[in-house]
Image: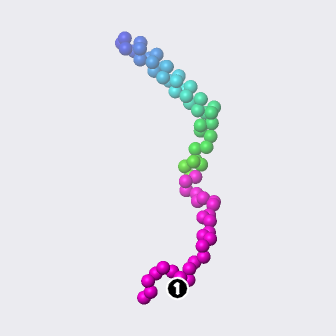
Amino acid sequence: MTSLYLLIPLSLLLLALAVWAFFWAVSNDQFDDLDSPAHRILFDDDLAAPPSRRRAKAPAERDEPRR
């Protein structure tokens, strides 16, 4: 029974801390947009790879052995 005198105020303190943390998170926009970061990885990048500036070599100019 004497442990209840310690545990009840301790649980109320932890409850108050959890409520404060929740309202702090809401006021600092932590729950503003939960879906976009998870879906952002699925979208392709808008920037395309730059085209190569070297022109393709003709088959005679390549460094391959002749057959």
Residue at the extreme bottom: 67
The structure residue drawn at horizontal position 55% and vertical position 49%, both measured from the top left corner, is 38
Q: Which of 19 and 62 is in front in this view?
A: 62
Image quadrant in which you'd find residue 3? top left
Residue 46 among magenta residues: yes
Check the image and report above or below for 66 versus 16.
Answer: below
Check the image and report above or below for 62 versus 22.
Answer: below
The structure residue drawn at horizontal position 57% and vertical position 78%, both measured from the top left corner, is 56
Report which residue position mark 1 lands on.
Answer: 60
User: How far across and down, in percent of the image, does residue 13 sit?
Assistant: 49, 19
Q: Nearer the viewer, residue 31 or 40?
A: 40
User: How far across and down, in percent of the image, does residue 55 sit?
Assistant: 60, 76
Q: Taken as a whole, is the magenta stretch helix, strand or loop?
A: loop
The span picked out in magenta is: 40-67
Give the mark count: 1
How packed mark 1 is, by other alpha carbons closer than 10 Å (few <14, some 14-19, many 20 or more), is: few
User: How far across and down, in percent of the image, does residue 4 sit?
Assistant: 39, 15
Residue 22 among magenta residues: no
Check the image and tell me how it is coloured. Answer: rainbow
Q: Nearer the viewer, residue 51 or 33?
A: 51
Image quadrant in which you'd find residue 66? bottom left
Check the image and report above or below for 16 versus 61.
Answer: above
Amino acid, disc 1: Ala
Q: In which quarter of the image is the C terminus?
A: bottom left
Mark 1 residue element: loop
The structure residue drawn at horizontal position 46% and vertical position 16%, both measured from the top left corner, is 9
The structure residue drawn at horizontal position 36% and vertical position 12%, both measured from the top left corner, is 1
